[in-house]
Amino acid sequence: MITLTASADEIGITVMSSTARAAMAANGGEGDGVGLMVRYLGINARERLHGGEEDATLTMHAEVCGTEFVVTVRDLGVPVTGAPDGVLSLLEIGVATAADARSDGASNVTEVRFGLPAHHRMVDTHGLQVVSEACEPSAEVVMFRPMVPGDAAALTRIIYRCYGWSYSHADFYYPERIAAELESGERIGEVAVTSEGEIAAHWGAVYLSASVVKTGGTVTDPRFRRRGIAGELGVRLLARLEEIGVIGRVRDPVMTHAATQEIALREGATIIGAYLNVTHPIQQVGITDGVGAARGSLSVAYSALRPLTPARVWIPSPYESMVRMVLETSDWPRELAPPGRSPACPDRSVLSTSFVSTNNSGQIVVTVVGADLVDAIDLTLHQMRRSGAEYVQVRLPANQPALGTLAAGLVELGLSFAAFIPEFEPPTEDGLGGDALVTQWLADSDVDASGWVFADDRVKNMVLAVIDQAREVGSRGQSLQRRAARRAQLFAVLD
């Protein structure tokens, strides 16, 4: 790791930029893009240091994390609500892989990730073919065991055999990214392997927070299907999650078939929402007719792996009926509290943002609800839309009383309900953490569900309710635009 403190002037910014550039180059990466990004971050921070009362110094940390080179810049200027426009623009053209910006109470923190050469090395498809659903079934014996970093390349190969190049989670095509996540503990998995070490099936999990994981990446080679292998992997994975103390398990079954929905329901999961248009178009061999024409959507299910702590939640009125739908199908100890007229809250919200250019998607995570909540989210949404976002997810802390009042206007920003996740963060006495209300903004809210398959009415009713609100919220913006156009026509004669 490199740590450097410099003054927020031309000399200091140049030293930071040159140091980051040299460090990236020393690790085999493209240094010019890193140098350009750090210079831009320094200039942006300098512009927010005004009035003479702030400490006009910048601190930069640079280190290798797995297959990425990560640069973090801290400053003590005006609080940030998201990554600067220029950072998102550089992300869009591929200079960096991801960016995150937030205020942590002590300083502003902007983190940018850059891919090292290993980050961009994809699955070796030499000799590989997509396996047809109509293939001959295999009776070969498989061995069940935990996944290890050495299995990463084999996992990318089974993904290719099942999906070609159309799998919705692009990281599964990059073996060294998977290996790095396994080594760091961010990912765990269970696999069924052949005597030659090839993976016949996989089921894994990644940490979404300290208390919740998302399970998925469930894939079975067509030659090994209808043998109960995926079910056995699911049992093994669940036992591991319970052993390591995970509170909750989120999964996102596809809606092109009902198999993974049925598994989730059979295991007692509650359908908590749907992420609409969240992935680029996908293809599933033997399931879909080629690559879909629209972005992919996912249902969302949650299972509590141990009893939840009783809690009160403050849900804004536009989303209350959706949360009630979730709670009515669960036994979670949750009480919907009425919004207060003047809830106590700080002037400024605390939030972080991230943007992934490869999926044209962003995320806004609010940790503290402040009086400026709507303005802060609106500004960040605007930045992401300008950078080509097609999907933005906003996660809100549902246990903070101010949320019920101050977030009531978020539908006017185009944010509709996505999901309600209990104990997404471990609960705290001061109300921080705990349950999450997830909302979503869609570039195209006209979601076509005509080809979707639902396991039962629990999935169908929730997903269609999410779609209905997304369409209704999305049409508000169009109505406002038409109203403005008509006003312009009416007043044109007065000009």
Image (cartoon, grey):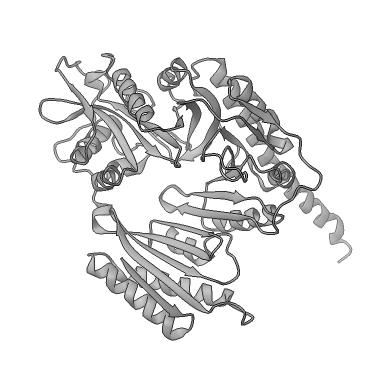
Residue 77 locus on image (x, y percent)? 57, 72
**Depicted 314 relative to depicted 83: above or below:** above
> Residue at (70%, 59%) from the top-left corner?
347
**Depicted 389 relative to depicted 338: above or below:** below
Residue 69 locus on image (x, y percent)? 32, 61
Q: Is residue 131 left or right of residue 334?
A: left
Of all residues shown, which one is farthest toward the right? 494
Residue 171 placement: quadrant: top left
Can residue 340 be seen? yes
Q: Is residue 142 left or right of residue 216?
A: left
Residue 132 locus on image (x, y percent)? 25, 24
Residue 404 placement: quadrant: top right
> Residue at (44%, 68%) from the top-left corner?
73
Image quadrant in which the N terminus is located? bottom left
Of all residues shown, which one is farthest toward the front? 429
> Residue at (31%, 28%) from the top-left corner?
219
Counting every numbered tag in the picture gives 0
Residue 466 locus on image (x, y percent)? 61, 30
